[in-house]
Image (spheres, helix red, strand yellow):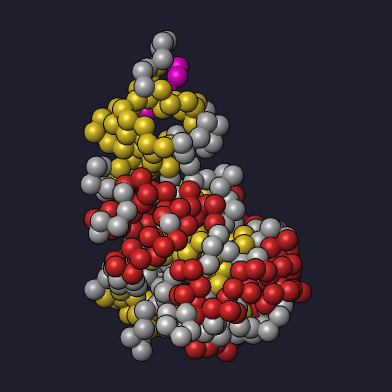
Amino acid sequence: MRTFIYADKFFLSSGVKNAGYLEITDGLFGVYSQELPDGEAKVIDQSGKWIAPGLVDTHIHGYMNHDVMDNDAEGIKVMSEGLLSCGVTSFLPTTLTSSKERLKDVAETIGKMYQEAPGAKIKGIYFEGPFFTEEHKGAQNPSYFGDPDLNTFHEWQEASGGLIKKIALAPERHGVEDFVKQVTDEGVVVSLGHSNATIDEAQKAVEAGASVFVHAYNGMRGLNHREPGMVGALLSLEHVFSELICDGHHVHPNAAEILMEKAGHDHVALITDCMMAGGMPDGNYNLGEFPVVVAEGTARLESGNLAGSILRLKEAIKNVVDWGIATPEQAVMMASLVPAISCKIDDSCGKIAQGRDADFIVLNPDMSLEATYLDGVERYHA
């Protein structure tokens, strides 16, 4: 018997379609049609709801009291399961700056277990660092900072089984251009952040192949009228993507709107930068090697500086619509297709298309999450 989802609206890769039926066969998307095709069929009725692709979180350190840097396969499985309640069906477990040995061990652990993730699917690994500079270190440990090194990166990549999809660095480090050219030739996305670089230094890295800016505005030299810096680079350079944390704490809604207007919604990737306290009550936690206090919607170091977030991606898409800076279609795109494209994983996630895994979410018209489906099966219901 054929199965169809009925809903009031569908966010398809070709655009938004109104009320109709989307076929699901053997856990894969079929064809959308306005009328129910002839023949016996099972219809899952989502009247009054909207169907959107499963969200893709390409920058997330932890969730449900587990951190990627714990190097615990079972903890990452808990993260994977928990992320379904956030509307996330695909993600990149994200590391923090640490020792060469620890990062190699974490890469190896994820490389061995990623196919066992029971919930949101692991589409690769994001190495955030360790090739940063101290001026904008954030919650990264500067004792491990250094210049990019290809041999070291290849050790990590080999340990991961080729799973590292993205690595972040500061453009002003020595040897950046050669490193960027080589790893991008190898299919790895390079992102720029935790940096005091000038706009010229950032532009050289982009010309070498870097294509993403890490959590826009945060952890980088700000915009100055005489030295536009990293923020000036992400606002003015073409063909680059910017990660953006829309929790209302990291970036003011007006600043988020400026980025979306300048870069285009199709070049802004909503991310969470969520740490282990995501989905947990207020209290004391750790981000990597640093103690963090979670209270009033933020995660902060003892210094008071922000340390990742406790944002859930389902909240980010609702926020940008509620703030009036994105339409529902744009919000969904910025949290699904755009992050997938920016990390070159859009061949397997980020959109509803015939033959793809039927990973999708059910939204209410107020943008709140109603349900999450994985391979055509409902796995979370609000």
Farthest top residue? 39
Against 289, is 114 above or below? above
Figure disc tally: 0
The spot of residue 13 in percent (x, y) is 47, 39
Against 10, is 372 above or below? below
The spot of residue 118 in percent (x, y) is 49, 48
Quarter in which the N terminus is drawn: top left
Horizontal side of 87 relative to 136 (left or right) equals left
Farthest right residue? 151
Farthest front residue? 226
Against 6, is 278 above or below? below
Q: Nearer the viewer, residue 351 or 163?
A: 351
Of helix, strand and loop, which mostly describes the magenta segment? strand
Residue 170 appears in the rendering: no
Residue at image position (30%, 57%) is: 325
The spot of residue 182 in percent (x, y) is 74, 67
Residue at image position (36%, 89%) is: 303
- Read off the magenta span: 1-5
Q: Quadrant of residue 124?
A: bottom right
Residue at image position (52%, 37%) is: 357
Horizontal side of 75 relative to 109 (left or right) equals left
The spot of residue 170 in percent (x, y) is 58, 79
Q: Is residue 106 magenta?
A: no
Residue at image position (36%, 83%) is: 305
Q: Quadrant of residue 42?
A: top left
Residue 193 appears in the rendering: yes
